[in-house]
Structure formats: structure tokens, C-alpha cells
Image: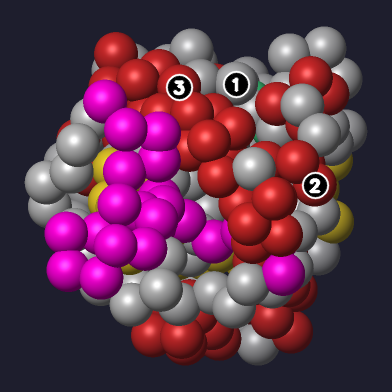
Amino acid sequence: MAIPPELISALRNAERVAVLTGAGVSAESGIPTFRDAQTGLWAQYNLEDLATPEAFARNPKLVWEWYAWRRNLVAQAQPNPAHLALAALERSVPQFTLITQNIDSLHQRAGSRDVIELHGNLARVICATERTVVEAWDATASPPTCPRCGAYLRPDVVWFGEMLPEAALHAAYEAATGCDVFFSIGTSGQVAPAAALPRIALRNGATVVVLNLDVTTSTADRCFFMNARAGEWLPELVSGLTAEG
Ligand code: OAD
């Protein structure tokens, strides 16, 4: 899909660029999204049984094992061209902020620096009571317990009903408010507060690009809606930006 030339020139003039990513960016690495009608995790599993503090209190083994399965899936996955293009974009603009709802570390593995993780990180494990990071645990236990206090360990991810990490959220708002171009990539925009970021950027004068497989491709004043695969469109964008012009 052709990259709109107005978008390339907005990017060339941009001082600050912010990007919000969601599960669609990792889809081409073989990691399921949440809301795809066929393969999305929430089409196959019940969110209330797996991704809330209440679910963990009710059935810690089930929740721990579901996240262990996802951790394993992610460990076997590789960053795809969308992750790599975003790492390249970071090197091509003066100020760049990458905000992700993903917990899979694929942006970091692709070379992105200073990734703002709104929903935590699957690879990190914390004590459910003390909230401190625990580096080593008994992999045969399900769930393992905290070596200090004996409470269950849990993944350091944000569950429904929990607060987002304050510093990350603050940095995300700042980036959305202050950027010249804002990208929302591979997210259905259904989960607050991340879903508000594109509107915040738009309200503050940014050019906004929404790319996923749900929208209809169209252009309106300062808004670009792109129905395309991130792993194809983003590398094209980066080569368009870095080409002579
Ligand atoms: P969703 O599953 O809600 O949305 C994925 C989006 O990616 C959809 O808009 C798809 O059209 C799009 N998509 C799929 N494949 C794509 C591709 N190859 N290229 C571009 N776009 C593609 O995932 P999120 O919006 O990330 O939160 O979900 C937000 C949050 O809801 C997640 O962080 C998670 C979930 O419940 C928590 O668990 C707290």
C-alpha cells in the first residue's frame, strides 16, 4: 500500500514522534491478538477467569499456567518487520517515544530503546503481596511462592481492574500531548486509558495515523486511517522516509 506523501512530509518536519502499539504489531510474529474473531485470545478464553486479580485469588494455578504458556510462546517468537521498522524509525526522527500495550518484549528485542510499557512485562515476576520483583523461582511450582514472605508469585502485568504503572502512564500522556505525529498501530483501541492517547494527540495538534486491520483506509484532516499489515506497511514507511526526496 502506498504511503501518503503528505504523511512522509509531516514526518520529515516532525520534531517529536510518538507511537502506540498493540497486539497487532506482534501478530506477524505468531503471537495471537486479543480480539480477533477467530484466533484472538478473548475469543477462546474468558478474560474474567484469567486476567483479573479476582481470577488469580480464585484459581492461582490456572492463571499462573496460562501466563506461563504465553511466556513460552513469546520466548519462541522473533521480532517481525514491524518491530524492526519501529526501531529504525526511532533512529530516523529527532525525538521518538514508543508506548506499548504489549508485554512480550519484542520491541526491545528488535532494538527499540526506552519502551514505555503500559501493561507490564510477561517476563517479569513479582510477589503478589509485596509487589517486588523476584528473579529466581521454583519452576516446578504452580504458582511458585515468594522466597521472602511465602505469598504467591504472579506475572508483572496489569490485570483488568488494576491501575497502570503511574510513571509509564504519565510519560505516555506527555508524549501524546507534545508530539507532532502520533501513530496508533495494531491496537483495537478498546482498552482505556491507552485508547485515549490518539485523541489526546489529535486535540493537541498532531497528525494522527491509525493502522490496523479494522479501519477503512481513508484520509481526513490530519488523520490517516490505514488498513494494512504492520509488518508490510511500516518498512515501506521507513524506506519512504529515508529515501531522497
Ligand atoms: P486487540 O486484539 O484488541 O486488537 C488488535 C488490533 O490489531 C486489531 O485492531 C487488529 O485489526 C489489528 N491487527 C491484527 N493483525 C495486524 C497486523 N498484522 N498488522 C496491523 N494490525 C493488525 O489488541 P490490543 O488493542 O493490543 O490488555 O488490546 C489491548 C489490550 O487488551 C491488551 O493490552 C490486553 C487486552 O486485554 C490487558 O491484558 C490488560
Of the residues shown, which amino acid type is indicated by label 2? Glu
> SS class of the residue under badge 3?
helix
Kindly identify the residue that appears in the image at 19 percent across and 37 percent down. 138
Give, as a single range, the part of the protein colored magenta: 140-161
> CA separation, marks 3 and 1?
12 Å
List the residue tagged with mark 1: 32
Kindly identify the residue that appears in the image at 63 percent across and 72 percent down. 162
Q: Which mark is drawn over residue 69?
A: 3
x and y percentages locating residue 1 in the rendered image: 63, 20
x and y percentages locating residue 141 in the rendered image: 32, 33
Is residue 234 positioned above or below 102 on the image?
Answer: above
Ranked by sequence position, the earlier of labels 2 and 1 is: 1
Query: What is the number of callouts on the image?
Result: 3
Q: Which residue lies furthest to the left in this view?
A: 136
Magenta span contains residue 142: yes
Q: Bin the neighbour count of mark 3 within 10 Å (Cα to Cα): few under 14, some 14-19, many 20 and up.
A: few
Q: Which residue lies furthest to the front in this view?
A: 150
Kindly identify the residue that appears in the image at 40 percent across and 34 percent down. 142
Task: Please tell me in which quarter of the rendered image ligand 1 is found.
Answer: top right
Kindly identify the residue that appears in the image at 82 percent across and 12 percent down. 38
Q: Bin the neighbour count of mark 2 within 10 Å (Cα to Cα): few under 14, some 14-19, many 20 and up.
A: some
x and y percentages locating residue 135 in the rendered image: 12, 52
> SS class of the residue under badge 1?
loop
List the residue tagged with mark 2: 48
